[in-house]
């Protein structure tokens, strides 16, 4: 028996595909699949891999979270877009091993942004 999430994802793929007036054959060709495989995805019979979910979202020009609408998973779809500099800073921050170092970076950034610093008791 198919998992309920697979059924919901399949239904969403079918609805988004139909809204864009794309046939199962066209979607299948774009993904390197047969239309029968697309049918199985849309029925929830076969599970869609992460890479295929990404390809479907790109092809249909939707956020990947749209494929999960109606599941509790969709609430995690939104993300913050970072500039390249902010991303590099975040990666560097994650590499810090020292808790004190991480706190120092947060304090410096808080002071530089003009926000009030909470005093630790």
Image (cartoon, grey):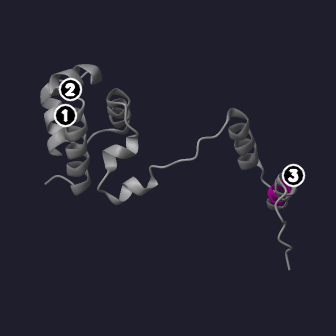
Residue at left offset 38%, top offset 29%: 58
In terms of secondary structure, where does tag 3 sit? helix
Indicate left or right for 21 with 103 as reference.
left
Indicate left or right for 63 with 116 as reference.
left
Indicate left or right for 50 with 13 as reference.
right
In terms of secondary structure, where does tag 2 sit? loop
Q: CA distance from mark 1 to mark 3?
A: 50 Å
Labels in figure, total: 3
Residue at left offset 59%, top offset 41%: 81
Q: Position of residue 93 (x, y in %)?
A: 75, 48
- Which residue lies under the disc numbered 3? 112
Sequence-first tag of 3 and 2: 2
Q: Residue furthest bottom?
A: 121
Q: Position of residue 53 (x, y in %)?
A: 34, 37
Along the line of sight, the residue nearer the viewer: 69 or 6: 69
- Which residue lies under the disc numbered 1? 18
Along the line of sight, the residue nearer the viewer: 2 or 107: 107
Highlighted magenta segment, given as a residue range: 101-106
| Above or below, 4 relative to 116 | above
Q: Position of residue 21 (x, y in %)?
A: 20, 28
Q: Position of residue 19 (x, y in %)?
A: 22, 35
CB atoms of marks 2 and 1 within 8 Å: yes
- Verify whether residue 29 appears in magenta: no
Which picture quadrant has residue 14? top left
Q: CA distance from mark 3 to mark 2?
A: 50 Å
Which picture quadrant has residue 71? bottom left
- Which residue lies under the disc numbered 2? 22
| Above or below, 65 relative to 76 | above
Sequence-first tag of 1 and 3: 1
């Amino acid at each position: 028996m198919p998992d309920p999430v697979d059924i919901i994802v399949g239904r969403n793929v079918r609805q988004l595909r139909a809204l864009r007036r794309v046939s199962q054959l066209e979607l299948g060709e774009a993904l390197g699949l047969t239309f029968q495989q697309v049918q199985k995805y849309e029925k929830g019979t076969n599970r869609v891999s992460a890479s295929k979910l990404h390809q479907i979202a790109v092809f249909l020009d939707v956020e990947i979270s749209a494929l999960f609408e109606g599941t509790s998973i969709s609430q995690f779809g939104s993300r913050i877009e970072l500039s390249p500099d902010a991303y590099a800073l975040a990666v560097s921050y994650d590499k810090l091993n020292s808790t004190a170092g991480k706190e120092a970076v947060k304090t410096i950034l808080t002071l530089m942004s003009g926000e009030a610093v909470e005093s630790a008791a």
